[in-house]
Amino acid sequence: MNIRESMELREQELLSPFASHSTDTRGRDRPEEECDVRTAYQRDRDRILHCKAFRRMKDKTQVFLAPQGDHYRTRLTHTLEVSQIARTIARALRLNEDLVEAIALGHDLGHTPFGHSGEKALEQVHPGGFAHYKQSVRVVEILEKNGNGLNLTWEVRDGMKNHRTSGKPSTLEGQVVRFSDKIAYIHHDMDDAQRAGIITEDDIPVTMRTFLGYTTRERLNTFVHNIIENSLDKDSISMSPDVYEAMMDLRSLMFRNVYENPVAKKEEERAMKMLTELYEYYTDHPEAMPGEYRELAKCRGVPKEQAVCDYISGMTDQYSMKKFRELYIPKCWEVY
């Protein structure tokens, strides 16, 4: 018995009967020889952690566009906070932490530069539309590894695709990540908004604070405990109705005060205009894209517009601004 097999045996012995066991995976699109050390979900986690799309998230907007402050969240730190919350819940429920971590680390790989404003721009300009959760799956199935993808297990891809509010993950681990994503962004976006002077604790109704907690830390603790208490030894992940309603009320407050706040989002129209201009330029000049995206359009039968969408959605905030400056901002004459 090798190390992987011994870990798979421990999963059978220790995990909840409702957990996803590595040996029961539906597998990968392309069969592979098993690793002698890592389980299938461990390998998926490692592949996501080492891929280029994961590294790019460090320079992608979470809420505040291209923030210059040292302590504002980025798409990468959001991802890490989702992973931490999800693993805490999964461990308490005796679910598969490796699967939870893989889904959490991969769920936002397809996000655009400038957060949801970039997503909105591509949705409007690209004939095929755009949704970041679909693009996250496209990244791991096709775009990474020079068009070969990461060849992840079905369960990880299912969790990534269904992490949005309306999603229906097939595993409890995917359901944990779906809740954890919402909990994470509500709390860290509120923390960032307080730092930016956009919102204060006094903007939260006192009845909500009395019920959920008077600080972001207390509210996070309330939500995590409530999920654990309502999901322990059950075949689905849930919150109690009153706490879930309070969480959605807090989310609505964040939309009114932060996500749709003209002060916080004052640069959004400019960012959308810039990405639209980039899309139109590269659609007219696909030869100006890097080789891997030209290859998609030329040799792999991918429509030119889709290859352009793949390229732009993978850009970081700073890289997209750099390309825009190169294409549209005149350079000074430097010969004296």
Image (cartoon, rainbow, N blue to C red):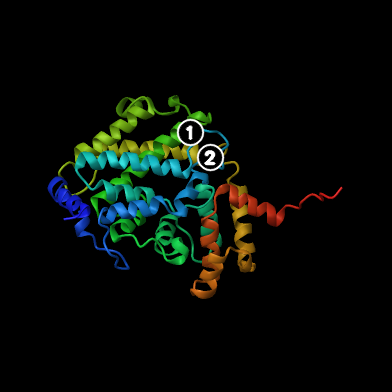
- Work out which residue is located at the far left of the displayed protein and give it: 13
What is the CA distance from the residue labelled 1 to the residue labelled 2?
8 Å
Q: How far across and how far down the image is residue 199, in percent?
A: 49, 30
Task: Give the residue number, with chain letter if any, for mark 1.
Answer: 192
Quadrant of the image for the N terminus?
bottom left
Q: How far across and how far down the image is residue 137, in percent?
A: 39, 59
Horizontal side of 293 relative to 204 (left or right) equals: right
**Label 2: element kind:** loop
Q: How far across and how far down the image is residue 121, in percent?
A: 55, 55
Label 1: how many residues lie within 10 Å, few (<14), some (14-19) or many (20+)?
A: some
- Residue at (43%, 53%) from the top-left corner? 109
Horizontal side of 7 relative to 81 (left or right) equals: left
Q: Which of marks 1 and 2 is nearer the N terminus?
A: 2
- Residue at (25%, 34%) from the top-left corner? 225
Task: Give the residue number, with chain letter if any, for mark 2.
Answer: 64
- Residue at (35%, 39%) from the top-left corner? 183
User: In the rendered image of this protein, does residue 287 appear above or below residue 218?
Assistant: below
For residue 166, say whether it is visible: no
